[in-house]
Image (spheres, rainbow, N blue to C red):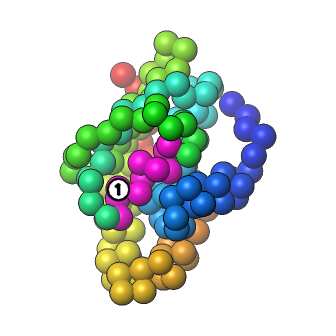
Amino acid sequence: MSRSKSLDQLLEEATKHHGHFGPFLVLGVRLALFAEESLGIKIEECFLEVPKTIPTLCTIEGVEAIVGPGRVKSRDAKKISGTFRGRGKVVRIHVRDDVVDEFQSKCRRHYEEYLESIVPHAREVEVRSSGELFELRNR
């Protein structure tokens, strides 16, 4: 599936909506884009499992920036994964545990200067390959 907006434009819009630019916001945007790419169609709805703590909670708004408001449901979980649906197709994607651990650790280390210090980490998520970030799990 092809989008008319670049990743930078999508991230800029997501950041305006969310209030700041961080690695888990970027991860959510990338997760939803990877789901669309995997299915080959626009996502109609999504169910996320996400630790509902800061900073992982930001993943939800990243996904919403792509899928759309009201189309994302979530529940508290120990790991980050999502089930994405569109036109009768379904894909389940798990965010690699090592990626979550890495960026949680980086955010924790810099918590006092949180908003300024996480930008380089968000850029790291932006440029990594989908294979480095996600595991595709078809149902």
Q: Along the horizontal axis of the image, is 18 left or right of 79?
A: right
Left or right for 76, reference 119: left
Residue at 36% over, 87% down: 112
**Identity, as a three-letter code, of the amino acid under mark 1:** Leu
Residue 29 in percent (x, y) is at 54, 49
**Residue 33 as seen in the image, left or right of residue 28:** right
Range of the magenta residues? 55-64
Residue 90: where, in percent of width, then height?
Answer: 45, 22
Dot 1: what SS? Answer: loop
The residue singled out by tag 1 in the image is 57
Magenta span: helix, strand or loop, mainly? helix
Compare residues 22 and 128 and report the one nearer the observer: 22
Q: Is residue 69 magenta?
A: no
Query: Which quarter shows the C terminus?
Result: top left
108 versus 93 height, above or below: below
The residue furthest bottom is 112
Residue 78 position within the rendered picture, expressed as x and y whole percent measured from the top left: 21, 50
Q: Residue at x 61, y 34 (%)?
A: 37
